[in-house]
Image: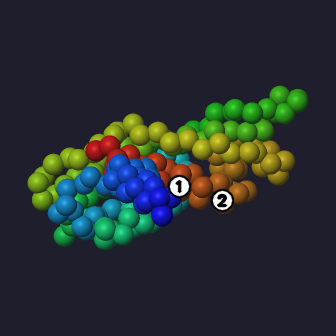
């Protein structure tokens, strides 16, 4: 009986300490229920990245069940607008003959999350950076972005998903 009381007391303390997984809580104003996320603008030379990032950001926001996500910027409580500015690679791993074996792909995005009811910018970052390391295979053979994305479609999907998770976490946790 004493053990049960200790477990119950511990459970009570843990549940009341405010602990939560990053990105799964939100301190957005309570009136924000419907969020518009129009297509991200793509100023980079990586085609299709705008569509994939937009879809990934919508899906990530949609995983927070308290929000309805729509592609329009009108008729919503808040709107997230974004621009993919650049995509670049940096060599971060090499073979024994000094050929690139691993690259870091960095995406620079400008984004703004605005409460439309109060006409107030809740979060903005015009130089939001997200990077993903990517192993080059012998079939890829180059750190050229077009070659990497042509040879391995999953690289582009992974970059989009990683960026979306990081961006949404920033908005929900730090606005």
Residue 103 lies, in percent from the top left, at 68, 39
Query: How many badges with numbers are in the image?
Result: 2
Check contact, mark 2 vs mark 1: CB within 8 A: no
Q: Which of 7 and 132 is in front in this view?
A: 7
Q: Residue at x 35, y 49 (%)?
A: 17
Q: Residue at x 25, y 54 (%)?
A: 28
Q: Which of 163 and 87 is in front in this view?
A: 163
Q: Residue furthest right?
A: 97
Residue 169 lies, in percent from the top left, at 41, 50
Q: Residue at x 39, y 36 (%)?
A: 127
Other-residue count near label 2 (Cα within 10 Å), few / some / many at <14 / 14–19 / ≥20: few
Q: Which residue lies furthest to the left in this view?
A: 118
The image's mark for residue 154 is 2
Q: Which of 127 and 141 is in front in this view?
A: 127
Label 1's element?
helix
Label 2's element?
helix
Residue 81 lies, in percent from the top left, at 31, 54
């Amino acid at each position: 009986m004493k053990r049960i009381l200790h477990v119950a007391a511990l459970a009570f303390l843990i549940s009341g300490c405010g602990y939560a997984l990053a990105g799964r809580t939100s301190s957005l104003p309570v009136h924000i229920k419907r969020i518009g996320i129009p297509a991200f603008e793509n100023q980079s030379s990586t085609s299709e990245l705008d569509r994939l990032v937009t879809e990934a950001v919508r899906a990530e926001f949609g995983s927070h069940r308290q929000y309805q996500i729509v592609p329009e910027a009108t008729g919503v409580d808040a709107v997230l607008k974004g621009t993919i500015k650049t995509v670049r690679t940096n060599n971060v791993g090499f073979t024994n003959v000094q050929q690139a074996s691993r690259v870091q792909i960095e995406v620079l995005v400008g984004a703004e999350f605005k409460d439309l009811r109060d006409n107030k910018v809740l979060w903005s970052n015009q130089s939001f950076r997200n990077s993903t390391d990517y192993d080059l295979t012998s079939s890829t053979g180059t750190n050229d972005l077009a070659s990497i994305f042509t040879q391995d479609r999953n690289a582009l999907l992974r970059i989009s998903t990683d960026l979306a998770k990081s961006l949404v976490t920033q908005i929900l946790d730090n606005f």
